[in-house]
Image (tube, rainbow, N blue to C red):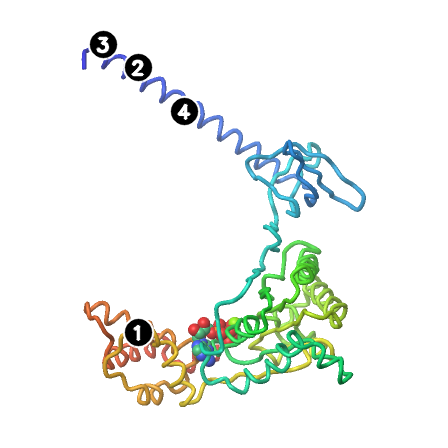
């Protein structure tokens, strides 16, 4: 490199640094402008349609629509809920997003990958849910012939990690139904009307995807008894709950849609949720007994290379464990074997894992009930 080359390069570095500095200043002034904009009262609207040129039709009050300029930064889609600047109607942020038919906070699974063979020790619960859910979905004519209304939904109640979500997924698969999964606490929203809007959208989505199972996990988050000590008197939660009840009633006779809810706080549930035509069948789950624990151990080790593992002893030693705990134990044992660079997992690895897991939670029992 000649001396002039070096000089040229140095000059270029200098000018780039300057440019960088200028851009930084510009960016920070934009950030300031933007944060000022965000602080002003904003209008809430939802995007009705995105035109070919990127402009958007946004409705922000009944019958009130505006055409807003494109926003490449946020890339909003039809159905998104957004905030708009009060004067310019520029979109400031996306509050909640509906992605290709998915409502925010909700998941649609075409066919869950859980089968009844993956579930241990829940034969009675499997049979009960097949009667309530699978039969009406697969053979609705049987109910018609005999002249009774098919059940519309089931409540799965029991301690954490006992296979409630697992069973709901398996029944969706065995009934060839789409699985729409939402979580009660996700429906508790900061914005007024947002929770009930989400409930409405979920039911609309189910209607577009028949046969479908709507699974509401943690239903206690919205269906909470007003007299319960955990009830916070939140009007918005109450409103979402009312919307849920009204959707349930409206859909009770719709063929091809079933409701399943899950809770581990049956004691605080509002009895309105359990009325006929809603979640009228209760299926209870308990911690697995010794025999069930052995089955769950076998299920979760199915794909593992084992060496002299005594399942009977392990089942005896895991008193108080839920299915989820057993899965954690199996994984932990596998990790121990890996650390020793072993090709297979021995009974001693399970014993070590058992000590770790029991220690970690002081006592597994305490952990389960908190
Ligand atoms: N009966 C069971 N058979 C096999 N695996 C189980 C069983 N119960 C739980 N598990 C394991 O534990 C994991 C968690 O279970 P699941 O999510 O179904 O619990 P849950 O009852 O829905 O708990 P929560 O109330 O916390 O939502 C499962 O993914 C599975 O690996
Ligand atoms: Mg669950």
Whole-angstrom CA distance, mark 4 to mark 1, is 57 Å
Ligand 1 within 8 Å, label 2 CB: no
Residue that protrudes farthest toward the right in the picture: 63
Residue 46 is labelled as: none
Residue that protrudes farthest toward the top in the picture: 4
Quarter of the image for residue 74 reads: top right
Q: Do the residues labelled 1 and 2 touch (CB within 8 Å)?
A: no
In this rendering, is residue 145 above or below 256?
below
Residue 255 x %, y %: 72, 70
Which residue does the numbered mark 4 point to in the structure image? 21
Q: Are marks 1 and 3 in contact (CB under 8 Å)?
A: no
Which residue does the numbered mark 3 point to in the structure image? 4
Which residue does the numbered mark 2 point to in the structure image? 11
Q: What element carries label 3?
A: helix
Which residue does the numbered mark 1 point to in the structure image? 304
Q: Is mark 2 on a helix, strand or loop?
A: helix
Specify which label sits upstream in the sequence, 1 or 2. Answer: 2
* For discs 4 and 2, the disc positioned in front in the rendered view: 2
Decide if residue 65 is on the left or right side of residue 179. right
């Amino acid at each position: 490199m000649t001396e002039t080359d070096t000089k040229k390069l140095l000059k270029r570095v200098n000018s780039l640094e300057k440019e960088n500095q200028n851009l930084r200043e510009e960016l920070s002034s934009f950030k300031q402008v933007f944060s000022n904009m965000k602080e002003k009262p904003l209008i809430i609207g939802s995007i009705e349609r995105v035109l070919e040129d990127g402009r958007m039709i946004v409705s922000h009050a009944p019958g009130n629509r505006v055409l807003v300029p494109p926003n490449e930064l946020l890339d909003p889609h039809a159905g998104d809920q957004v905030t708009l600047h009060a004067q310019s109607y520029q979109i400031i942020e996306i509050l909640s997003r509906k992605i290709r038919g998915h409502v925010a906070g909700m998941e649609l699974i075409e066919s869950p990958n859980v089968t009844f063979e993956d579930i241990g020790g829940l034969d009675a619960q499997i049979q009960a849910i097949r009667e309530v859910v699978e039969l009406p979905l697969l053979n609705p004519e049987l109910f018609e012939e005999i002249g009774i209304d098919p059940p519309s939904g089931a409540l799965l109640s029991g301690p954490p990690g006992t296979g409630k979500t697992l069973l709901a997924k398996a029944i969706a698969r065995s009934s060839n139904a789409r699985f729409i999964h939402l979580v009660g606490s996700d429906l508790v929203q900061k914005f007024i009307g947002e929770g009930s809007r989400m409930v409405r959208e979920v039911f609309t989505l189910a209607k577009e995807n028949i046969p479908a199972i709507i699974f509401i996990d943690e239903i206690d988050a919205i269906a909470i008894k007003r007299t319960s000590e955990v009830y916070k008197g939140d009007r918005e939660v109450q409103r979402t709950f009312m919307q849920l009840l009204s959707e349930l009633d409206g859909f009770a006779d719709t063929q091809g849609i079933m409701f399943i809810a899950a809770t581990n706080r049956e004691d605080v549930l509002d009895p309105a949720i359990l009325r006929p035509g809603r979640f009228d069948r209760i299926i209870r789950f308990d911690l697995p007994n010794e025999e069930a624990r052995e089955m769950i151990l076998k299920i979760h080790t199915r794909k593992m290379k084992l060496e002299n593992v005594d399942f009977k002893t392990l089942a005896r030693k895991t008193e108080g464990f839920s299915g989820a705990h057993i899965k954690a134990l199996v994984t932990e044992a596998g990790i121990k074997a890996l650390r020793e660079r072993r090709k297979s997992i021995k009974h001693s690895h399970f014993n070590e894992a058992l000590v770790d897991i029991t220690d970690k939670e002081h006592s597994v029992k305490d952990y389960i009930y908190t």
